[in-house]
């Protein structure tokens, strides 16, 4: 039985936005107004999704294949299909709500499971954003530091991480709504594509060679068809690499032609899947059991690899503000931080303050946890497996009604949720063990 809550006139917009619908009241009647506008193009939405997904995920794919074996190809295809499927499910859930009012990921949880559902999604969304943006700060800071040291300029990793975090923060506070992220997405996609291309070409030109001498000498690389013990952690990492579901509501809400969403998300996931398959298969073929994460650590350390490091660092600087803004916009909307309510300058000041505090916390995470591969695996196992697989399927079934969906859709939702739970439990266990091992080795 639904629990009664105070009326909207008696509380803040936060209280009103959390209110569970009363019996006989539709979801549409209890959501707060939104300040987002549908001014973005379908192509801009496509670029936003790719910019968020492609990048550091591609750097971990060869290592993921090393963990799972060649069966990693199948895992990438499965996660690509799941990414497109749950992307459609999320918007179907939103379409059960009033499109003229707020459309956010956490409101889906509220509509399906009440206030607990919304709070759970808030927590998972926050863990995802803090984890991935912190990871981006780690990667970009380490990459710029390595390139600088290679050229005789050593200022240390921490200053570079702070510089990169500052650049991300400046871009994040400038984003009023997701449609304004198109420029960042264009640059982000371009830099990531260029970096991946350089990496793939380098791997083809200089694969493993057991006859190599000197600093690059190593034994003959080997490959496996499948490694059962590594499938769970590999699946968790790949799910991390496909997780754009947290930004999808904001991206879809910015589209002038929302009916094209299915084509947009399908095209985006298809593009990402293709890029991942190319990077993963060539990287694993080239380096086999010696594959490292990030991928660039396997490549010849020359000018081309330095350029690729700089490009991928620029990509994450462009992508991080989009991811952070997707969460910040939901928090600001729930707290009533809108221009209509506060006025232009007060809204700007409060928005800058909120996002500054948020980025300060994420920078603290980046400075404290410098383990790129392990952090990526843990974040992917704990939060993205649930966000990508379990929550969209569960919310859709709950909102639509078990008896109102076809048996094919029932089986699909159950299968997707099962994949997410498997990756979450076993993947998190493996990731924590790897992280503990690396910390112990460093000590």
Image (spheres, rainbow, N blue to C red):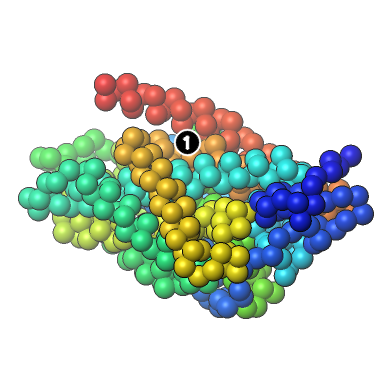
Q: Residue at x 62, y 42 (%)?
A: 386
Q: Residue at x 58, y 37 (%)?
A: 423
Q: Position of residue 294 (x, y in %)?
A: 33, 46
Q: Quadrant of residue 312?
A: bottom left
Q: In the picture provided, is 150 more to the left or to the right than 219? A: left
Q: Secondary structure at mark 1?
A: helix
Q: Is residue 90 above or below residue 69?
A: below
Q: Position of residue 307 (x, y in %)?
A: 22, 60
Q: Position of residue 322 (x, y in %)?
A: 47, 60
Q: Residues within 10 Å of mark 1 (few under 14, many from 20)?
A: many
Which image quarter holds the C terminus? top left
Q: Quadrant of residue 188?
A: bottom left
Which image quarter holds the N terminus? top right
Q: Which residue is mark 1?
A: 378
Q: Is residue 422 above or below residue 48?
A: above
Q: In the picture provided, is 363 more to the left or to the right than 76? A: left
Q: Quadrant of residue 406?
A: bottom right
Q: Residue at x 7, y 50 (%)?
A: 152
Q: Choose between 234 and 384: the one closer to the eye.
A: 384
């Amino acid at each position: 039985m639904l629990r009664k809550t105070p009326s909207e006139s008696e509380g803040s917009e936060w209280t009103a936005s959390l209110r569970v619908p009363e019996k006989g009241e539709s979801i549409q009647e209890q959501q707060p107004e939104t300040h987002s506008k549908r001014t973005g193009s379908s192509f801009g939405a496509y670029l936003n999704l790719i910019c968020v997904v492609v990048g550091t995920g591609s750097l971990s794919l060869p290592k993921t294949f090393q963990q799972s074996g060649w069966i990693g190809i199948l895992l990438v295809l499965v996660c690509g299909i799941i990414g497109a499927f749950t992307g459609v499910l999320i918007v179907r859930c939103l379409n059960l709500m009033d499109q003229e009012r707020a459309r956010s990921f956490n409101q889906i949880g509220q509509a399906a499971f009440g206030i607990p559902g919304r709070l759970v999604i808030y927590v998972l969304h926050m863990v995802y954003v803090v984890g991935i943006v912190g990871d981006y700060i780690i990667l970009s800071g380490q990459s710029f530091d390595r390139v600088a040291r290679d050229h005789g300029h050593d200022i240390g990793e921490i200053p570079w991480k702070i510089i990169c975090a500052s650049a991300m923060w400046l871009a994040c506070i400038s984003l009023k709504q997701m449609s304004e992220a198109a420029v960042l997405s264009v640059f982000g996609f371009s830099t990531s594509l260029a970096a991946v291309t350089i990496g793939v070409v380098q791997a083809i030109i200089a694969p493993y060679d057991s006859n190599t001498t000197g600093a690059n000498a190593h034994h003959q690389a080997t490959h496996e068809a499948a490694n059962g013990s590594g499938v769970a952690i590999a699946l968790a990492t790949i799910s991390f690499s496909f997780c754009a579901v947290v930004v999808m509501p904001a991206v879809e809400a910015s589209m002038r032609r929302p009916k094209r969403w299915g084509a947009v998300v399908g095209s985006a996931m298809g593009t990402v899947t293709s890029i991942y398959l190319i990077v993963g298969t060539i990287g694993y073929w080239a380096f086999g059991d010696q594959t490292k994460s990030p991928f660039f650590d396997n490549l010849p350390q020359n000018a081309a690899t330095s350029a690729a490091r700089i490009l991928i660092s620029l990509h994450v600087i462009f992508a991080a503000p989009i991811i952070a803004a997707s969460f910040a916009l939901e928090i600001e909307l729930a707290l009533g931080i809108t221009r209509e309510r506060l006025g232009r300058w007060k809204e700007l000041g409060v928005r800058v303050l909120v996002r500054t505090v948020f980025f300060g916390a994420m920078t603290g995470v980046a400075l404290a946890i410098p383990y790129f591969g392990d952090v990526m695996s843990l974040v992917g196992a704990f939060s993205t497996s649930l966000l990508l697989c379990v929550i969209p399927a569960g919310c859709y079934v709950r909102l639509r009604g078990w008896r109102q969906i076809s048996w094919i859709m029932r089986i699909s939702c159950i299968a997707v949720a099962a994949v997410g739970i498997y990756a979450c439990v076993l993947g998190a266990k493996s990731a924590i063990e790897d992280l503990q091992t690396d910390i112990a080795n460093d000590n």
